[in-house]
Image: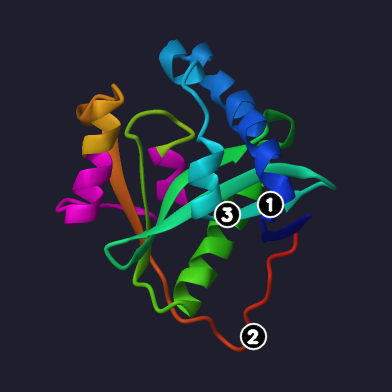
Amino acid sequence: MEIREAVAADLPLLPPIEVASGEAFREIGMPWIADDEPMPLAVLERSRVWVALDPHPVAWVAVEVVDGNAHVEQISVHPDHARKRIGAALLDRVRRWAADEGLTAVTLTTFRDVPWNAPYYRRLGFEEITEPTPGLRAVVAAEAARGLDPATRVCLRRPVAPPTATEAEPAM
């Protein structure tokens, strides 16, 4: 599966993937998350976005720089392509980009107790941030303003290391 930086023609294809991936929240009693509006195209246009193709986008990740880190704004994998390590491959691509850019880490905010959220990211090497940076505190505050309970959220961080000469794109 190819992972590449998104082009303008990809962007309108991404919100339906986010909507489809959000349906899993309905199944665990969080319908308000499933019903949440997808990331607006204007935000996607100003973010760094990578897509996984099969042959069209089936997953994507949007990133912005927050306090010297690559912050994952959103990652979505269409349920028809779940459990194939596509999300992990997208996060690895973000980590390599962050290392190339001289950024310190990859950060994200997520639900503390949803199995495919914080527990999943921990398995990928993310660790809880006990003292969020000012930028991450602002992200959490913006989430709270949208109705997300900060007590259910967690900030996570995975350090980046400079890429080695032998590091290659992951095979999928």
Residue for point 46% across, 75% down: 99
> Dot 1 corresponds to which residue?
8
Q: Nearer the viewer, mark 2 or mark 1?
A: 1
Looking at the rendered structure, which numbered label has been put on residue 166? Answer: 2
- Determine the image quadrant of residue 164: bottom right
Q: Is residue 20 above or below residue 77?
A: above
Q: Are marks 3 and 1 in contact (CB under 8 Å)?
A: no
Q: CA distance from mark 3 to mark 1?
A: 10 Å
Say the numbered circle drawn on residue 49: 3
Mark 3 lies on a secondary structure that is strand
Q: Is residue 107 visible?
A: yes
Q: Position of residue 98 (x, y in %)?
A: 46, 70
Q: Quadrant of the C terminus?
A: bottom right
167 or 55, which lies in front? 55
Q: Is residue 152 visible?
A: no
The amino acid at mark 2 is Thr
Magenta region: 118-140
